[in-house]
Structure formats: structure tokens, C-alpha cells
């Protein structure tokens, strides 16, 4: 406040105030870090309260989380007060773990306490003795985290934007279009999601490695608010890090002791909690419910109350029995006939899990878990929680890191892909032109795809693989892989129709049947069985972008890169995460935007997600016809630099004819000869560039705009024709003259590729087109940028086709064309 008054008195510039505020915040950050040091805790307790208020104002109140004590043997969690007793002389008597696993066991010798030490004694530099947990569990309360979110201006409005969405029937665009979201509008006749201030949460549990060369795993428990729009949902400032499970190893069977404080809070949130927020009143009652659990298979089983995937009943969606082959000693995961699978129900699963929890002996517990595939989870204490439906299958681990990697490993082990083949794959990959943000495949194919990330497996599977593998493997293996790729392309769409989801499901069924014929049943994996449950997950939660684990994996990578001193690393990681999250949150002061720009560029490890939206055509209901494309609603944004140009008569005549066909009743009279050109245009967060520029990888596009009448005439405009690839020649900002006024409009001049007789030589979606394009000026060579469906991956090479060997252009569209 004083700074703003100084600005009024002395007329300090905005930049000076911004710099001053930044310096103060950085100075307070340094002070706060010093005060948070363990060796200065005694000194910090004597600091006046005003200084701690300044720390909170500066956004660096780092120790605002709880620390529990974890037994290093049985993973039981205790509060700090439960781990010691105070003696009269002021010393602390440390307790040991008193957990008894089977406290009702009939044999007294089996009712032993764990007895492990919980605290460790040490001495400070001054010789003072103190104790600290051997394994600390850092826990940030969910109520505090939600309160920090709702206090931010605009957060509540973001959470309510989903109510204004308009999407065609039969199309899944986000989690709001899934059946779970519809079913939980009302719960037991009472409104839940139908009312404001009620939040749906998604839970993720995963482990990461904070050391490069040491086997040490730390578990992270995340929560995400599903009410937020998809482009904001997985930003780091909106994600809640609930807790950090200490290493060095993952818990073996469950993580119930770490979920217990979370479930206690979720029960309170279900009843309603008063939170301070940014509303006019300053506080309101909020409710929240956990409606989704999305993790990889091991974490899902430990968190959701299921046995391992290699068990007799190893599926968490159905009760199919996986039998072991006596001769080979391996489990058979084949038999992909869904009609014979008995689905699990939440009621029965919770009942059998309760029997396992109440078992008095280890033998009895193992028998129940083997027979029913159920273990107790703390999440079952939530009255509304559906133990089966809420546990989704993560497509990232299931499809990309699971089956895609498994198939290539088999090809390499069985000699189907030789070392020479791998070298040829690498050579083909290097010659493919892809947009810059798609990402290149690293130079590791020749070594057997070692070190591929999930995103690289996605790009390889959906973009590169079909063209690169053609001719290097047999037709039977290629056909099998083609079915898998087509399923992945459909399932990995940002928007998907129910009809297309059915098509992807049929492709997966065909892929699995071909896989069993080629490799045998013993090479089938649990992921392949789960492929046939993906459809029901997407019907419940919408497209995979609503719930898959890419964002959590990115945040894991951020946490494991935090610097620490190798001691109590969970505490240090939690501090650094909260520090970065506080600095990445929007500032509410007058100069918040300027400060945020500076701070975002300096914060290490901050995750920013670019939600590039695919263009979508939906037949009849959502297809933007040419007649409805109004000039006043032009959404394309041309990017500088601009160049003045004069259109020649042929271009003006072609443009005028194009507008007459688009708007026969709008009275377009002329196109001004004076126009501007540019090299790049942005539309729906996608940047397109002209051919020959530095960003020419974005010059190949796909559009529904024209069709061929015959081989001797130029293409004609037909917005309902089949999609067709083209090369962008130039962007033109034209002045269109109507009877009433003049409008500016962005059009693109393209060179359409000509059809090839062997167009589907590689199988859909890869296409073969002729090298030569149409370069003359005619009405169909100009189109509005809004008509572009998306970009293409192209590769020009000499290909041995069915008839002859010739140089062609191989095209793979990156857009999604949805039909209802």
C-alpha cells in the first residue's frame, strides 16, 4: 500500500513499481528460506508475528503442511505426538511401532507388535540432542489447498464454465459429457454437481525417482478439480499435491495408512466445509467428492483395493479368471470374448474386501483375496464411492507404454525386426516432416527403442510407424499393427463421437485376435485384456484427454529434478513444490500481470501445457457450411511481419468467384486489389506457415473444400467433399467489398495434391498422393483459414507400389474428422 502511495506522490512509473515489488518479494523469499532452516527453528519462534505475516504476504509460507511419522517396516502412519512421551526432566522417550496385523489371531505368538523404531536421535552443532522421524510423511491438507484455490479471483467462474457448453449429441468432448458426470448431478435425490460450489475431484498416485543412480522411490498423491476447463485443469498451479509417501521402496500391497487422513477430509468435504473465497460475502459452503481414480496398474491396485494384475482374478473391471499354463508356468491372458466376462459390482467388491480386512490369519486373508480379487481400501469409507466404476484405465500406460512397447519388444526378440531393419527405420524417420511441436523421434530406434517416453511412443505409434514399417515386416504383422494404430489414433483424439469409439473398439478386438494367431496366447499381457474395458471408461469419463496421466507424469518429472541435500528429501520436495506453486499463482495486486510474466520465466520446473485443439468436423449438425461462415466472425489471426501487395486480375477474379459461391445472398460486389500477405497464421492455437519458410513443417494441411470433376478440369469448390491435402503457398488479408461495408478476411492460397490410384497402399489413415500439385489460380485454390481441418505429416520418397516404383508424397493427417 505504501508503494502505491509513493507512486501517487512522486509519480513513479509502472515499470519501477513492478521492479520494486519484485525485489521486495525476492527479499522476503530469501528471509523466509533462512527462517525455515531446521537449525534456526528456535530463533524463528521468537520472530515477531508481523514478520510471519510478511512471509505469508510474500507467498513463501513454506512449512504450511503436516509431517507424520511412518514406520519403516510396516508403513503405519503416526502423528508426531504419538511417537514419544515427555519425561519430567524434559527429555523425550521414543516409542516403537505398536501395529499388530492380525490382532485377533488365535495363536498368541502371532499377535506380535511390529516393534520398529520410529524416531532417530541426533545432536546439533551445539551439542543439543533432538529427535526426528526416520521416515516422514508430508501431508498438505485438502481443505487448505481448496481454500487457496477458491480464494483466487476467477477460479469459481472457471469451475462453472462447463454449464454453458454446447456440444452435439453423441459427441464426447470432455469429462462433462461422460455418464458419471450426468449421474452425479443428483445423488440420492439431492443436487450435487447440479449446484454451484460442489467440486468433483480426480485422484492420482504414482512413484518417481529423486536420485539418478540410487534405487529410491518417493510416492506422490495428487488431486485435480474436474470442474475446471481442460486447458486449466492440469496446470501446476491448479493441481493439489496431497502427500509424499517416503521411500526407499514402494508399499507392497496397499497404501491405506497414507490414504487415511485424505479420506477423513473427503468425508468432511462431502458433508460441506466453509471456505474463505473471493466471493462478495468472503466465505461459502463447499462440497467435494472423489469421482475418479486414474493411475498406472500397480498404483491403481494398491490404492483402489485390488490384487495384483498377475493374480487369479487380476482384472479390476471384471471377474475373469486368468489361469496359468502348467507346462510353461505363465499366465494366459487371452480369451478375449467379452460376453463371457462377469462384471464386478461395487457392492460385492466392498463386501469381499471387508472379509479380507477382518480375516484373523494370513492364510484366511490370502484365500479370500485369491478367490475374489479384493483387498480393503480406505476409499471404501466414502459412502458415495463406486469401487469399480470410478477406477479408470489409463490409456497412456495401457496403450502406449504397455502394448505398443510390448509388440516391438517381441518383434526384436523373435527376429522379426533385425538390426538392419532398425537402421532403416531410423533413416525413414529422419526424412519425415512433422510440425515442430509434434516432437522428433530420438536417435534410439537402432538400439531397440530404449528410453522412449510416453509422448514419444504416442508420436511413433500414431504418426511414424505405419509408413516406416511398410515392407520391413510381413503383411500379417503389418495388418495386425495397422488395426492397433487406427484404434490409437481414434482413442487419442481430443474429441470423439460414440460411433468412432465403437470403431476403435472393433479395431482393438481385431488386433487382439490377430495377435493371438501370430504370437500365441502366452504372449498376451494384462494390458491387452484391459483394452476391451477402455470403451466403458471413455463412456463414463469422456475422451482420454480428460483423465489420462500425461500431466501427472510431467509433474513427477518436475518433482524428481528438485535439488536437495539427500536428507529428508520428502520434506524438501514438498517445500519446493509449494514455493513454486505459490509463485506461479496469479497475483491479485494492480501490477500482478507484469510480475507474473517475470516470475514465470524464472521459476524452475514449472509445467505449462499447450492444449492444441484439433479441428473437428461433425457431419450435418456441427459441420460449418460455407453459407454460415460469416466474414464478421473470422477467427484466424495473421502474424507479423506483413507485406503490402497488389492482387493481379486472375487472383481477384478467383477470389471473387469463391466469395460468390460461399455467400450467394450476401451481396459481395468486389475484392480490393490492395491486400497484405504474411507467412504465418494462428487459428484455434494452431500455427500454420507457408511453404519455403523456416517453419515449413506446418505448411502441409488437410481440408474439406474441393473435388475433382475429371482429370482435365480444375477442382471445384465443394465443402462436403472428401478431405484432401494441400501445400500452403501464401496467406492473404483481403478487403472484401459488400453492398453495405468492407470486411477484412484472411484467406489462404494452396496447391492441392492430386489423387493417386494407390491412395490406400499403406492402409488408413496413411495415404499416397501424387507429387505434382495444382498451382494455377482458380476459385478452389483459395479457401478461408477456418476451413482447414488440421495439419499433415508428409514424406516424399520413392516407393515400390503395387504397380510400379515411383516418387510420391505419403500423407498422414493430424486432424480429427468426426462423423455422427
Image (cartoon, grey):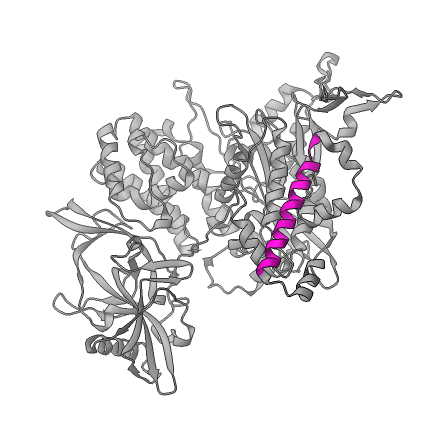
For residue 152, above or below residue 346: below
> Which sits in the foreground, 200 or 737?
737
Q: Name which residue lies at 18% across and 47% down.
A: 797
> Which sits in the foreground, 235 or 381?
235
Identify the residue at the far bottom of this view. Answer: 739
**Number of numbered discs:** 0
Identify the residue at the far top of this view. Answer: 109
Compared across the picture, whether 687 is left or right of 206 comes to left
Give x and y (percent) for residue 603. Answer: 54, 45
Give x and y (percent) for residue 303. Answer: 59, 35
Identify the residue at the far front of this view. Answer: 10
Q: Does the magenta segment cover residue 557?
A: no
Residue 158 shows up from this direction:
yes
Q: Does the magenta segment cover residue 36?
A: yes
Q: Which residues are magenta?
A: 15-38
Screen quadrant of the N terminus = bottom right
Give x and y (percent) for residue 681. Answer: 36, 63
Residue 336 shows up from this direction:
no
Compared across the picture, whether 641 is left or right of 526 comes to left
Considering the whole magenta stretch, tell me its main secondary structure: helix
For residue 3, above or below residue 94: below
The answer to which quarter of the image holds residue 348 is: top right
The answer to which quarter of the image holds residue 10 is: bottom right
Q: Name which residue lies at 40% across and 71% down.
A: 634
Identify the residue at the far right of this view. Answer: 88
Screen quadrant of the C terminus = bottom left
Give x and y (percent) for residue 786. Answer: 36, 67
Amino acid at each position: 500500500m505504501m508503494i502505491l502511495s509513493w507512486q501517487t506522490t512522486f509519480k513513479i512509473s509502472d515499470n519501477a513499481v513492478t521492479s520494486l515489488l519484485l525485489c521486495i518479494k525476492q527479499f522476503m523469499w530469501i528471509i523466509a528460506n533462512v527462517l525455515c532452516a531446521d537449525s534456526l527453528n528456535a530463533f524463528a519462534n521468537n520472530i515477531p508475528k508481523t514478520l510471519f505475516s510478511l512471509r505469508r504476504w510474500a507467498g513463501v509460507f513454506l512449512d504450511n503442511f503436516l509431517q507424520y511419522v511412518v514406520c519403516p517396516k510396516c508403513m503405519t502412519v503416526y502423528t508426531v505426538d504419538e511417537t514419544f512421551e515427555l519425561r519430567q526432566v524434559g527429555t523425550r522417550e521414543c516409542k516403537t511401532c505398536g501395529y499388530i496385523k492380525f490382532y485377533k489371531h488365535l495363536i498368541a505368538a502371532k499377535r506380535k507388535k511390529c516393534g520398529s523404531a520410529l524416531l532417530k536421535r541426533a545432536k546439533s552443532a551445539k551439542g543439543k540432542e533432538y529427535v526426528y522421524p526416520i521416515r516422514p510423511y508430508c501431508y498438505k491438507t485438502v481443505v487448505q489447498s481448496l481454500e487457496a484455490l477458491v480464494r483466487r479471483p476467477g477460479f469459481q467462474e472457471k469451475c462453472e464454465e462447463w454449464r454453458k457448453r454446447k456440444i452435439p449429441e453423441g459427441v464426447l468432448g470432455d469429462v462433462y459429457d461422460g455418464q458419471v458426470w450426468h449421474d452425479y448431478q443428483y445423488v440420492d435425490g439431492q443436487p450435487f454437481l447440479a449446484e454451484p460450489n460442489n467440486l468433483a475431484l480426480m485422484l492420482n498416485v504414482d512413484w518417481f525417482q529423486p536420485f539418478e543412480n540410487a534405487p529410491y522411490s518417493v510416492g506422490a498423491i495428487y488431486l485435480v478439480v474436474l470442474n475446471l476447463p481442460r486447458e486449466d485443469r492440469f496446470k501446476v498451479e491448479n493441481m493439489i499435491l496431497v502427500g509424499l509417501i517416503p521411500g526407499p521402496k514402494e508399499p507392497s500391497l496397499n497404501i491405506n495408512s497414507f490414504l487415511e487422513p485424505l479420506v477423513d477430509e473427503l468425508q468432511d468435504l462431502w458433508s460441506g466445509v466453509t471456505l474463505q473465497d473471493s466471493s462478495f460475502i468472503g466465505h461459502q459452503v463447499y462440497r467435494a467428492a472423489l469421482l475418479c481414480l486414474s493411475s498406472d496398474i500397480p498404483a491403481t491396485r494398491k490404492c483402489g483395493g485390488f490384487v495384483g494384475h498377475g493374480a487369479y482374478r487380476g482384472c479390476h473391471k471384471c471377474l475373469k479368471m486368468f489361469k496359468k499354463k502348467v507346462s510353461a508356468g505363465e499366465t494366459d491372458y487371452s480369451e478375449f470374448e467379452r460376453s463371457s466376462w462377469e462384471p464386478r459390482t461395487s457392492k460385492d467388491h466392498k463386501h469381499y474386501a471387508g472379509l479380507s480386512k477382518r480375516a484373523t490369519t494370513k492364510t484366511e486373508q490370502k484365500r479370500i483375496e485369491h478367490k475374489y480379487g479384493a483387498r480393503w481400501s480406505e476409499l471404501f469409507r466414502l459412502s458415495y464411492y463406486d469401487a469399480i466404476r470410478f477406477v479408470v484405465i489409463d490409456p497412456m500406460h495401457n496403450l502406449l507404454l504397455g502394448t505398443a512397447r510390448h509388440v516391438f519388444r517381441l518383434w526384436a526378440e523373435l527376429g522379426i525386426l533385425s538390426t538392419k531393419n532398425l537402421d532403416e527405420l531410423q533413416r525413414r524417420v529422419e526424412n519425415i516432416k512433422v510440425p515442430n511441436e509434434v516432437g522428433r523421434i530420438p536417435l534410439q530406434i537402432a538400439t531397440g527403442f530404449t528410453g522412449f517416453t510416453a509422448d514419444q511412443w504416442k508420436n511413433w505409434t500414431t504418426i511414424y510407424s505405419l509408413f516406416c514399417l511398410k515392407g520391413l515386416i510381413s503383411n500379417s504383422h503389418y495388418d495386425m499393427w495397422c488395426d492397433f494404430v487406427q484404434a490409437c489414433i481414434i482413442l487419442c483424439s481430443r474429441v470423439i463421437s460414440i460411433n468412432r469409439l465403437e470403431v476403435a473398439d472393433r479395431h482393438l478386438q481385431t488386433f487382439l485376435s490377430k495377435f493371438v494367431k501370430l504370437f500365441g496366447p502366452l504372449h498376451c499381457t494384462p494390458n491387452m485384456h484391459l483394452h476391451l474395458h477402455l470403451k466403458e471408461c471413455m463412456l463414463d469419463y469422456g475422451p482420454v484427454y480428460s483423465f489420462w496421466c500425461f500431466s501427472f507424469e510431467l509433474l513427477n518429472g518436475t518433482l524428481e529434478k528438485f535439488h536437495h541435500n539427500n536428507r529428508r528429501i520428502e520434506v524438501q520436495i514438498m517445500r519446493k513444490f509449494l514455493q513454486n506453486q505459490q509463485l506461479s499463482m496469479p497475483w491479485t495486486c494492480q501490477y500482478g500481470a507484469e510480475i507474473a510474466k517475470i516470475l514465470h520465466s524464472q521459476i524452475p520446473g514449472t509445467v505449462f501445457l499447450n492444449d492444441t485443439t484439433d479441428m473437428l468436423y461433425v457431419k450435418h449438425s456441427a459441420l460449418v457450411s460455407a453459407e454460415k461462415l460469416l466474414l464478421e466472425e473470422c477467427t484466424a489471426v495473421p502474424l507479423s511481419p506483413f507485406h503490402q501487395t497488389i492482387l493481379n486480375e486472375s487472383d481477384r477474379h478467383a477470389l471473387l468467384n469463391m466469395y460468390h459461391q460461399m455467400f450467394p445472398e450476401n451481396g459481395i460486389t468486389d475484392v480490393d486489389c490492395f491486400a497484405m500477405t504474411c507467412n504465418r497464421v494462428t487459428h484455434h492455437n494452431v500455427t500454420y506457415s507457408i511453404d519455403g519458410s523456416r517453419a515449413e513443417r506446418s505448411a502441409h494441411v488437410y481440408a474439406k473444400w474441393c473435388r475433382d470433376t475429371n482429370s482435365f478440369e480444375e477442382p471445384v469448390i465443394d465443402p462436403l467433399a472428401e478431405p484432401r491435402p494441400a501445400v500452403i503457398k501464401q496467406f492473404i488479408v483481403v478487403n472484401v467489398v459488400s453492398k453495405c461495408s468492407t470486411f477484412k478476411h484472411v484467406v489462404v492460397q494452396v496447391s492441392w495434391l492430386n489423387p493417386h490410384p494407390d491412395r490406400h497402399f499403406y492402409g488408413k489413415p496413411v495415404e499416397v498422393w501424387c507429387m505434382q500439385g495444382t498451382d494455377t489460380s482458380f476459385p478452389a485454390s483459395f479457401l478461408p483459414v477456418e476451413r482447414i481441418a488440421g495439419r499433415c505429416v508428409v514424406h516424399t520418397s520413392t516407393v515400390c507400389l503395387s504397380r510400379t516404383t515411383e516418387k510420391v508424397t505419403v500423407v498422414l493427417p493430424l486432424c480429427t474428422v468426426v462423423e455422427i
